[in-house]
Image (cartoon, rainbow, N blue to C red):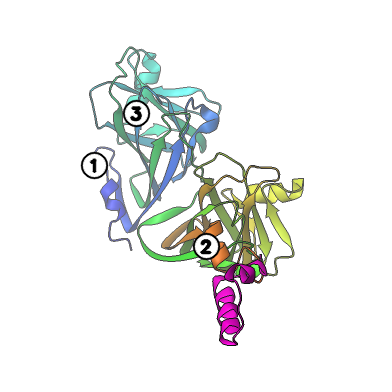
């Protein structure tokens, strides 16, 4: 059980308290500029007497419209909304799957919608059919937008829950800011263990040189990689083992995002291409599944992940990361930070030019001198380059 449990999200006002094992999970999402319903951040399933969904975020002049989506598995919804800044009024609306507003906090809304919002914020809750719903948070009519407002939003159904899913929503505030994507719908235990290791990508890297990033166990472990790619180490390979699970998920993000990268998933031999962000229609569909909430169907086995530049893309240095999951949760995260050789280190290590390294040149030169021969060191180097 998590040492920080779901009891932190009890609501006496809504008569909803945590019981049983009281597990608490967390994840981050991004809220893009000029959002619409189609950009809504998915919070997961709100299941009566089982789950609770919580969001923390901040509206501002730069990003004033926030949308969230959830699936109701029950017949009523309760909401606990708090404006933690409180210097300007916020408007909260509940919308059905068609985008129709069915509850509204604003005094400019109809009496019917305001009454529905009061029910939503009561211990009885708002009667609702099972299905998809949306929440919109924005500044209320005629309210000042000069000061950003931090808020929290809790969703409940029933009078108890055993698991709380906490989402931190990070708004994009500039077009220059990269919007990170993770559509895998995978949550971490609040106090998940984390282990770290380091490695390096080399020039002319092949699948035989793949960096081993560890193993994935469904609903238990996840793997996180932070790396960079450059024109010297432009083909980068990773080895991952699916120890238990029937699907793989990957969330990939290019943080620099000034040129396009290609991500491919291979079988353990590196000969069968299973998913490709830039392949055939079938391979791209497999990649979409791999990076989605269901994942790509996979057997317990070893797999290879290749990161490279997209065809025809400029080979500018890019900083990227990705996570590998199986299932919906994890309590242990293995993080690997991977550097990349530049031309100088690749040449010195013998990875840039076949047969050449500082050690091989020095050994050959010293051996020649020891035999009494007079040789120019530059002539010796020229044999390898």
Q: Residue at x 31, y 55 (%)?
A: 19
SS for dot 3: helix
Prevailing secondary structure class for the magenta stretch in the rendered image: helix
In the rendered view, tell whether residue 60 sits above or below residue 19: above
Q: Mark on residue 345?
A: 2
Q: State the SS at label 1.
A: loop
Q: What label does residue 12 carry, if any?
A: 1
Up-down relation of residue 92 to residue 123 (above or below): above
Magenta segment: 356-385
Q: Residue visible at 75% across and 49% down?
A: 282
Instruction: Tell me if mark 1 has few (under 14), some (14-19) or many (20+) residues whose alpha carbon lies within 10 angstroms of its own.
Output: few
**Alpha-carbon distance for marks 3 and 1?**
15 Å
- Crowdedness near tag 3: few (<14), some (14–19) or many (≥20) residues, C-alpha within 10 Å: some
Res. 22 mark? none
Q: How many marks?
A: 3
* Mark closest to the chain's N terminus, 2 or 1: 1
**Magenta stretch: includes residue 383:** yes
In this picture, residue 337 sits left or right of residue 291: left
Gap between marks 2 and 1 measured at Cα = 61 Å
């Amino acid at each position: 059980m998590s040492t920080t449990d779901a009891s932190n999200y009890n609501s006496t006002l809504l008569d909803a308290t945590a019981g049983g094992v009281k597990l608490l999970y967390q994840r981050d999402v991004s809220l893009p500029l000029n959002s619409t319903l189609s950009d809504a951040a998915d919070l997961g399933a709100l299941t009566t007497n089982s789950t609770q969904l919580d969001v923390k975020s901040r509206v501002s002049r730069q990003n004033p419209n926030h949308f969230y989506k959830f699936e109701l598995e029950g017949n009523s919804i309760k909401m606990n909304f708090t404006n933690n800044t409180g210097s300007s009024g916020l408007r909260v609306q509940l919308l059905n799957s068609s985008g129709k507003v069915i509850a509204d906090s604003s005094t400019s809304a109809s009496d019917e919608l305001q009454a529905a919002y009061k029910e939503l914020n009561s211990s009885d809750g708002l009667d609702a059919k099972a299905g998809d719903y949306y929440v919109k948070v924005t500044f209320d009519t005629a309210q000042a937008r000069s000061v950003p407002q931090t808020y929290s939003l809790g969703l409940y159904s029933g009078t108890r829950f055993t698991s709380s899913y906490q989402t931190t929503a990070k708004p994009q505030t500039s077009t220059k800011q990269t919007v990170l994507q993770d559509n895998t719908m995978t949550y971490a235990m609040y106090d998940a263990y984390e282990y770290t290791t380091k490695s390096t990508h080399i020039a002319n890297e092949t699948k035989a040189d793949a960096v081993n990033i560890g193993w994935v166990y469904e609903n238990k472990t996840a793997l996180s990689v932070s790396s960079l790619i450059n024109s010297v180490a432009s083909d980068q390979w990773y080895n991952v083992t699916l120890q238990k699970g029937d699907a793989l998920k990957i969330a990939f993000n290019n943080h620099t995002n000034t040129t396009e990268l290609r991500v491919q998933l291979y079988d353990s031999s590196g000969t069968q291409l299973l998913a490709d962000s830039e392949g055939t229609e079938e391979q791209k569909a497999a990649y979409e599944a791999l990076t989605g909430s269901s994942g790509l169907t996979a057997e317990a086995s070893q797999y290879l992940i290749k990161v490279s530049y997209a065809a025809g893309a400029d080979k500018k240095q890019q900083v990227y990361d990705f996570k590998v999951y199986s299932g919906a949760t994890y309590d242990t995260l293995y993080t690997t930070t991977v550097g990349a050789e530049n031309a100088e280190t690749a040449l010195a290590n013998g990875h840039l030019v076949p047969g050449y390294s500082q050690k091989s040149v020095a050994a050959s030169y010293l051996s020649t001198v020891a035999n009494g021969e007079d040789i120019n060191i530059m002539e010796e180097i020229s044999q390898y380059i």
